Amino acid sequence: MAEKTKQHFVPKLLLKRFSWDDIHVNQCLIRKGLEIKSVPYKEQCQKRYFYGSDLHIENGLGKIEDLIEIELSKIINGCLIPISKPSAECLNDDNMRLNILLFIYIQYTRTLKARNIVDAEVSRRFELFKDKDRENMSNALIEASDDGGWGMTKEHVNEFINSLRVSTTDPFYHIFRVANERYNKNKHLKSAVIFNYSKLPFVMSDNPVLNVVTVFPEHVSSFFMPISPAHYLFYFNERYFNVDSDNNVIFTSDYDEIRYLNTLQCENSNINIYTSRLGERCTMLDLAGDNSSGGAFWKKINGISLSDAYKNNLSIPINGGHATKVDAFKN
């Protein structure tokens, strides 16, 4: 029981792949500056009883993670050396593709930032409810006060209504139920891995799944998630996207593309960015920089493009309020 009091919202199976010694990762508190320091990865992205003290959700997540760790290893081991015919043909297996997609949906909704967004939305809707129904609430309270002899004035009632707050209890039961519904509607998404064979690594954040929404006649989601400094998973709707891959592998060594994905991780993060071991002179500006402006998302990523019939549609880099601009990159 004690070892499960600290519950990870980014699992160790992802964090450890950015470690060079099975102990440490590099961490950057991206909202506070660009300093990088070495920290133990096992202590990152966790909160006490984050999913509840009954351990029901925590145990369920653990079973999923055990399965996914094996499958992510297959992908990474198939893409190690560019000249050795890297392959992600394993993603053609529907069970594997769908298992990882479910994991991506769960990861997208299980982080501290995702929970904060839900809490903020619940509070916002409650405030709207209070404003809309304030007169009825006020009249009912004054009537009750008169009947009970409490002596409440309209001013007292308004102060009381203003003081009311709402908070969520066990929100992940609802959050994961919605995630599962969305997953069931998107089982048709295909998958590939972006293989980075340059010397500039991918980074990962404490909110690692990027949901890039493209506006067609409908809103179409595509998911990106780093699984190592050299590998990024990509899930897409083949009706809308042309993906130039070789055995489900998209190759890149383009520093602008890599920095662009890294910048999106920084913008999508809550607090922390994690990196692998870096060269002595390598900085966060080298890894990311402010490359998110100037051009549509899909034009930035080699090997991925919109289908001709939809090429003029709008891409929205990050959906649902998950993006906050990183001012630290501005000069």
Image (spheres, rainbow, N blue to C red):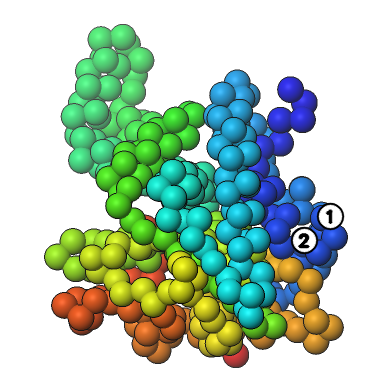
Distance between the alpha carbons at the discs numbered 2 and 1 = 6 Å
Instruction: Identify residue for label 1.
Output: 23
Locate residue 223, reporting x and y percent: 42, 61
Instruction: Identify residue for label 2.
Output: 19
- Tag 2: residue type? Ser
Locate residue 239, reporting x and y percent: 23, 65
Image side of residue 230 versus residue 187, left or right: right
Cβ atoms under marks 2 and 1 closer than 8 Å:
yes
Q: Residues within 10 Å of mark 2 (few under 14, many from 20)?
A: many
Q: Does residue 99 appear in the picture of this structure?
A: yes
Q: Above or below — where is 313 with respect to 226?
A: below
Q: Nearer the viewer, residue 210 or 84?
A: 84
Quarter residue 134 falls in: top left
In the image as oriented, which residue stretches furthest toward the top?
148
Image side of residue 305 versus residue 203, left or right: left
Residue at x-position 48% and y-position 29% = 169
Image side of residue 32 versus residue 270, left or right: right
- Tag 1: residue type? Ile
Residue at x-position 36% and y-position 59% = 190
Q: Does residue 159 appear in the picture of this structure?
A: no
Locate residue 170, reporting x and y percent: 49, 29
Residue at x-position 70% and y-position 76% = 34
Q: Residues within 10 Å of mark 1 (few under 14, many from 20)?
A: few
Q: Nearer the viewer, residue 229 or 217?
A: 229
Mark 1: which secondary structure?
loop
